[in-house]
Image: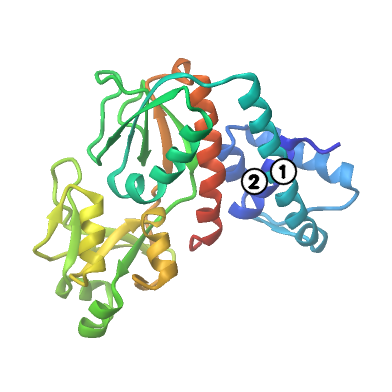
Amino acid sequence: MTRITDLELLVRIADLGNLTAAAKALDWSPAAASAALKRMEEQLGFPLFVRSTRSLRLSGEGQRYLPHARAALRALTDGRDEALAGREALSGVLHLTVPSDLGRHVLLPWLEQFQERHPALTLRLQIGDPLTDLLRRPVDAAVRYGPPAGNAQVALPLLPDCRRVLVAAPHYLALHGLPTSPEDMARHEALRYLRAGEVPTHWSVSIAGEPVNLPLAGRRVADDGEVVKRWALAGLGIAYKSWPDVAQELASGQLVHVHPHWRGDPSPLHLVLPGRAQLSPALRQLRDELRRRLEEFARSMPR
């Protein structure tokens, strides 16, 4: 019988196109992931992937099997969660800090649904972009882009293969046009996010595999990610946002992906804890749910 963890690995490899990245996302070693994939293929009796020196791609059999694996995984994880919820009612206080934009527009409804299923759980939610020192503040965990602030903290991946994208409103581009070259960015209004008190002078991207710094100019800087997105939606300039922050607006056409072939910086999303001992049953279940929900962003992200 195929294990639920093996199905999770299969779906991750298919989404990320890389066994090592999939193993990292699931907190597995590459060797354990490779052994699990081999075991699954032996049980099924056909290869799931065609291997090359740099990546994996689904075989014909794998392409036909994957939709069934996704459906089975959803059913199994839903059943597991329902069984665990009946056996172990979550209670107590869960104090989280989440980014401004992602927290309000993506995470908040998910957190509300999570709390509805666990009515004995009290949620204290702190919304804001500045980094929180989890060792000095009474916070159980933080959802944050990028690596943890300190070596003593533990970062558990939620969306490891996440990147930043250049976005603008259609009416801004209709008035000002696309940047014709990296240097041309200097004539555009860059909507900049104030990070650690510093105003960025450039944004880093990769063009045809080569790192490039885009020069920036503009009159608008904020230390709140939601404000930057609101400026972009209002047609006031070009913003550089992490994909989950703008996925809904890109899908609806409110924002446009500017030069998709300009590959943005990595922006992995983590659940950050003061230490692994703080991974309570509530945080463990919340982390599993957020990872599953964020998979839809992983499937729609540009590669």
SS at badge 1: helix
Residue 303 visible in the picture: yes
Quarter of the N terminus within the rendering: top right
Q: Residue furthest right?
A: 45
Q: Quadrant of residue 246?
A: bottom left
Q: Which residue is mark 1?
A: 75
Q: Disc 2 marks which amino acid?
A: Leu
Q: Residue 34 or 276: which is nearer the viewer?
A: 276
Relative image position of residue 290 (x, y in whole percent) = 50, 40
Q: Earlier in the sequence, mark 1 or mark 2?
A: 2
Q: Is residue 84 left or right of residue 278?
A: right
Discs 1/2, front? 1
Residue beneath the point at 79% across and 56% down: 65
Amino acid type at circle 1 is Ala
Frontmost residue, 248 versus 260: 248
Give the residue drawn at x 29%, y 60%.
240
Q: Nearer the viewer, residue 173 or 112?
A: 112
The relative height of residue 77 versus residue 204 in the rendered view (above or below) is: above
Q: Which mark is residue 173?
A: none
Q: Is residue 207 visible?
A: no
Q: Picture coordinates of residue 180 (x, y %)?
A: 28, 81
User: Which residue is disc 2 drawn over?
Assistant: 19
Q: CA distance from mark 1 to mark 2?
A: 24 Å
Identify the residue at image location x=25%, y=40%.
128
Q: Nearer the viewer, residue 225 or 203?
A: 225
